[in-house]
Image: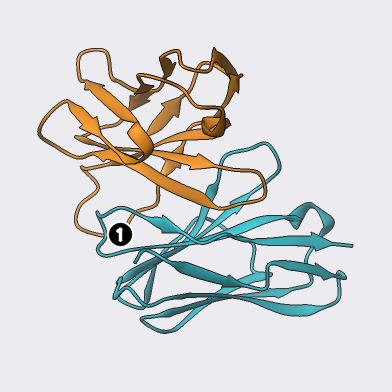
Amino acid sequence: AQSVAQPEDQVNVAEGNPLTVKCTYSVSGNPYLFWYVQYPNRGLQFLLKYITGDNLVKGSYGFEAEFNKSQTSFHLKKPSALVSDSALYFCAVRDGYSGGGADGLTFGKGTHLIIQP
Amino acid sequence: DTEVTQTPKHLVMGMTNKKSLKCEQHMGHRAMYWYKQKAKKPPELMFVYSYEKLSINESVPSRFSPECPNSSLLNLHLHALQPEDSALYLCASSQGPRETQYFGPGTRLLVL
């Protein structure tokens, strides 16, 4: 079984400061990891993913994430936060061991990111 | 273009009604998904279609009936729903089984 943990319900950051949203995962095989953002009353927007390769992944809107296999973590980061980054962020995982068939994503509970002006 | 469209945006239905949710993508994606998201909760997988065949049904009650008429369309037929089925229903698609899933804006369903 696969699972994702986002330990923080809410993260508060001042505008212009760096931000980190934490995510840890558990899978049987190799992890496929994703970050999505959800604005109020909207669907999920894809930010970035890690499948294989470089542990530092760069994504949309200046976000990046670092894959750490030993700590089973995939934390989302941004060097300088904007007020418009305030939203609900979901980490998601798919187990790469589950064969070639289509498979759904397992999401963490989500972290509310609040950027204060 | 990574657009997935969903109609209607909002739906209110009684427990005896029959309604359908529609999802469409024109990206040539061959896998399509239905998720259910309750308020302040993460999305939960309901169904997966791969190459127009149902490949995963996450023990969803039979009052939810998915249909994939062709590679671009995905429907979710609703019948005799309960108030606890009120939620945001999200559709997603991906180019292949292991590729990034792109989500539509969702249909917000209220069952009275």
Q: Note whether B63 is above or below A49 in the view shown.
A: below
- The structure residue drawn at horizontal position 43% and vertical position 17%, both measured from the top left corner, is A19
Q: Residue furthest toward the bottom?
A: B69
Q: Residue furthest toward the left?
A: A53
- The structure residue drawn at horizontal position 55% and vertical position 34%, both measured from the top left corner, is A84
Query: Which image quadrant: the N terminus of chain B?
Result: bottom left
Per the image, label 1 sits on a secondary structure element best described as: loop
- The structure residue drawn at horizontal position 30% and vertical position 31%, both measured from the top left corner, is A27
**Tell me, what hue is chain A?**
orange
Residue A63 image point, x, y percent: 35, 31
Q: Tell me the kind of residue under disc 1.
A: Ala
**Tell me, what hue is chain B?**
cyan
| Closer to us: B91 or A25 | B91
Q: Note whether B53 is above or below A92 in the view shown.
A: below
The residue tagged 1 is A102
- The structure residue drawn at horizontal position 67% and vertical position 50%, both measured from the top left corner, is A41
Residue A100 image point, x, y percent: 19, 57
Q: How is the image coloured?
A: by chain
| Closer to us: A37 or A51 | A37
Residue B6 image point, x, y percent: 57, 70
Task: Using a 10 Å C-alpha cutoff, classify the residue at mark 1 as few (fewer than 14 neighbours), some (14 to 19) or many (20 or more).
Answer: many
Please state if A70 lies on the left or on the right of A94 as rendered.
Answer: left
